[in-house]
Image (cartoon, rainbow, N blue to C red):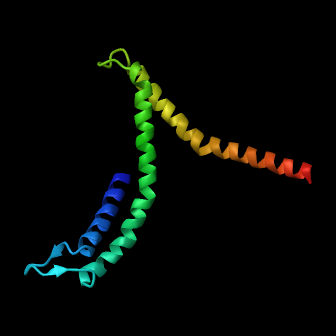
Amino acid sequence: LSIFLINSGQSWVAARKYILFGMLRDMSGKVIGPDSQEYENLGVGEMIGGPFEDTTGPALNNFIKFVAVFALVTEGLYDETPENTWQFGFACVFGSLLLIGFSKFGLTLVLNCVTSFLRQRQLQQG
């Protein structure tokens, strides 16, 4: 879904820039510019495409970085054939689920503890 959203957002933006720079021509060869109805129609696309890129771009970049680092770190665990290393595949799935659970619940718990500690410290100083 993220790849679809970022690609469709970039397509809207690219189409708008294509017309803005005067690169689109009609059947007779006349340049379609920013004062045309086509450009106005792409204004709606800009309102849709911009948020698509803004919301999915950072999430997708972090996911790609995480997968790349995880693959690099665990690369020595695997053989070319799965007869001896299938257990590591299940361990990776379990580790991924554990990380998802920690990021969902553990970070909230840590932030609550830090907030509570800072409140207690403010009360003691006051």
Is 82 in front, or is 78? 78
Q: Position of residue 3 (x, y in %)?
A: 34, 52
Residue 1 appears in the picture as rendered: no
Quadrant in the rendering for residue 36: bottom left
Is 91 in front, or is 36? 36
At x 43%, y 25%, the residue is 74
Residue farthest along the front direction in this orientation: 21
Q: Is residue 47 above or below residue 11?
A: below
At x 41%, y 28%, the residue is 72
Q: Is residue 89 above or below residue 45?
A: above
Residue 80 appears in the picture as rendered: yes
At x 32%, y 61%, the residue is 10
Q: Classify residue 122 as left or right of residue 85.
A: right
Q: Quadrant of the C terminus?
A: bottom right
Q: Position of residue 88 (x, y in %)?
A: 43, 22
Quadrant in the rendering for residue 12: bottom left
Q: Position of residue 19 (x, y in %)?
A: 24, 74
Q: Position of residue 119 (x, y in %)?
A: 82, 51
Quadrant in the rendering for residue 5: bottom left
At x 69%, y 46%, the residue is 111
Q: Classify residue 25 as left or right of residue 101.
A: left
Q: Classify residue 30 as left or right of residue 21.
A: left
Give the tally of numbered discs. 0
Residue farthest along the left direction in this orientation: 28
